Amino acid sequence: MFVRLQEDKGVQATVTDQINPIFNAVSNQPEYQGQVSWNRAFGAKAANNLVVSDQYYSAIFSTANLAASLAAFPTTLIYNDGAFTGLGGADVDWPQGRNVTGYQLVDDYSYSIGSSHTLKAGLYFHRNLVSDHDYGPNTSGFVLPLSLTNYYDGIGLMINQSFPTALEQNIKLYQLGLYVQDEWKVKSNLKLTLALRADHNSIPTCATNCFARLAGNFESISHDVNTPYNQTIQTGIGQAIPSFTRIAWQPRFGFAWTPHALNNTVFRGGVGLFMDTFPGQIADALSQNTPVYNQFPNAIFGNISPQQIANGSNIFATAAASNTALTNGFKNGETLAQIQADAAAAGGVFATPGFNNVGPIKAPEYWEWNFEVQRAIGNNTSITVNYVGNHGFHETAFLNNVNAYCPVAPASTGAPYCPNGFIGLPVTQPDQRFSSVQQIETAAVSSYNGLSFTAQHRFSHGLQMQVNYTWSHALDEVSNGGFNQFITGNVSSGRVGSLLNPINDNNIRQYNYGNADYDTRHYVSLNYVYELPKGPTALLKGWQLSGTLFARSGLPYTVVNSGASGPLNSLGYGASVFANFSGSSTPACNSPSSITSGPCLSPSAFPDLVAGGDIGQNQLNSGTEDQRRNQFFGPRYFNTDMTIMKYTMLPHWEGAKIGLGAQFFNLLNHPNFESPVNDINNGNFGHILDTVNTPTSPLGAFLGGDSSARLIQLTVKFNF
């Protein structure tokens, strides 16, 4: 029996305010884990392994005393013209986070039948209880005066504010899996493995019935502007989605063969179907829909007269009146026009809400296969060549706005227009009762092929080394399921990060199927450990040198055109628009000269840039895409770390030793660069402005510490 308990406590510094420390934000993050493992043999043929474990962690982000910080200043104020530093810190973002309790049970039983078969069966159960606190952002409001003069006059004040029915929602989900397996020793040199696994993922449930969704797919509901909202939106739902894959059957087969003529060589391979777990972030999206969670983003403009101020009116009262009109109007079965009239009568403004909806949702699945050859050369060397491939289907995709449109209108109107259409967008808005409608479907696919080479050698004089090289190619329509960017953008430099939405919602493959965000064509890694020769004195004994080296080719990115996407976004089209590209090849920004001496992308290859005038208008007029997603590649990456330690055996401690030494991160102080600014509508287009941090930094990633330079850390280790 094995028992393990862990406790981790700490306070994370999240935001440091420039004005007053009362607005500083922190996150107290305790974590507790426990595990009990029990191994039991039943005679010589059977054995069982049982593992029961649980975990609790909390990660709530807020100020030390949110009530006190809001009493000091009741909102977050940012001047659009940059006249003054913002006030209120990041109170608009708080509170948010989650408390999670998870527990699981894993049991594996094996039974041997003679010397040929080993039968195995197992059970896996995992349950998560999530206390979701992501409904607090924007509840205190975010005020954005368009200028200092507007702020003084009380005109042109923009407020973003949200009105959730609760600041916390409790969401539950679980996974149950079963498998049976037979390891069949056909011959002394051939073993086959046949297995079948079945998984059931529960649909997330909400204890307070906090989900809201449309009565069907966006395409199937009535878009009549006179249809009341409560006939189109289903509320009080305790189950996130209508249905999900009930049982995912996953057959698998593998083999291992050692030819008699090649005793030091093993051939291995296999193929199998694997299921991914339920994408739980879908539950977040559906619990933040109208009328459970009402949002008024950029919708309320203050134009408050002195008399109205004297009577107690302000932009917060305007937003509250708008929310009351929406809540009551929805309950009473009112239409868009009726709710707008109610809001206007109460001194508010009602803007059509955005909405998150779900289309057909199935369990993401992957066929995976591999073939490996491993060869031992003597007692100290081995070489392995392995081919790995997979094909994913039913992967998540966020259709950016199925309610988007681009009207046909003359240029004299000054409004966004698309004379020739734009990537299948209709010329009129399909449903005037909503602004953007994001629909989540499991309609995406992916593929991967990789060939890796590994060599390991143990030298006779205390040196051990392993080197790995992989060539691979990953393709998909959207990476990470469209949930999170693999490469984040940088607003200050104009660099746009990984794209999360397809360009054409009606055909997500048309422009988006291309290199995955993490497509790494070439990757090399090396690690080594060198026990220095023992010297004649204690001071010269016990020295160890170890280190790692990583090198890879650049990551892909897409050149975008905010001059075209900006006008479309005002019409609800939320995705980035690819820039027109007329070049014959897609250059990589790899050479030192391309990084340090000017842009590494030629503006002449992008017609919108050289056309002059209204950048992006040409593409709006043409409605075409001359570029596929992720065809350009950023700078290569290289890093090497090293550790030198002196170990000393401790007397009277059997096998115990203490080590003193130093760790060198980015030993060569080598700069690694981000991809270039990829928005052709930005003055820094094609220039590389940022370095990237190393993944092995002792500083961590969240706090933004600059770990791109060489860092040296003193280390003490106690091994026993």
Image (cartoon, rainbow, N blue to C red):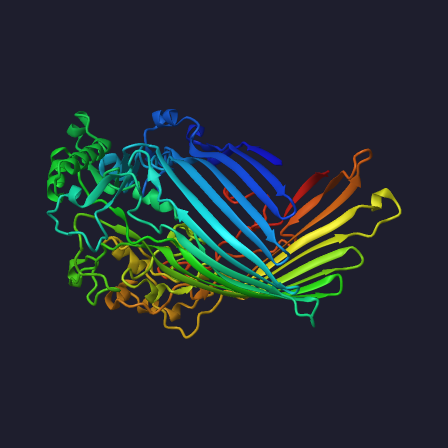
Residue 348 vs residue 262: left or right? Answer: left
Residue at far bottom of view:
584
Q: What x and y, as percent, mark residue 450?
A: 53, 65
Q: Is residue 92 above or below residue 434?
A: above
Residue 226 vs residue 163: left or right? Answer: left
Residue at far right of view:
536
Q: What x and y, as percent, mark residue 602?
A: 42, 68
Residue at 40% across, 36% down = 130
Question: The C terminus is located in which quarter?
Answer: top right
Task: Identify the image quadrant of residue 365.
Answer: bottom left
In this view of the protein, which residue sits in the foreground, 589 or 304? 589
Q: Is residue 249 above or below residue 136?
A: below
Question: The N terminus is located in which quarter?
Answer: top right
Task: Identify the image quadrant of residue 638.
Answer: bottom right
Residue at 19% across, 57% down = 415
Q: What x and y, as percent, mark residue 448?
A: 47, 64
Q: How many marks?
A: 0
Q: Is residue 213 visible to the viewer in this orientation of the structure?
A: yes
Residue 84 vs residue 569: left or right? Answer: right
In this view of the protein, which residue sits in the foreground, 14 or 610? 14
Q: What x and y, as percent, mark residue 109?
A: 56, 46
In this view of the protein, which residue sits in the foreground, 104 or 28? 104
Residue at 28% across, 59% down = 505
Q: Is residue 707 visible to the viewer in this orientation of the structure?
A: no
Residue 389 vs residue 442: left or right? Answer: right
In this view of the protein, which residue sits in the foreground, 692 or 394? 394
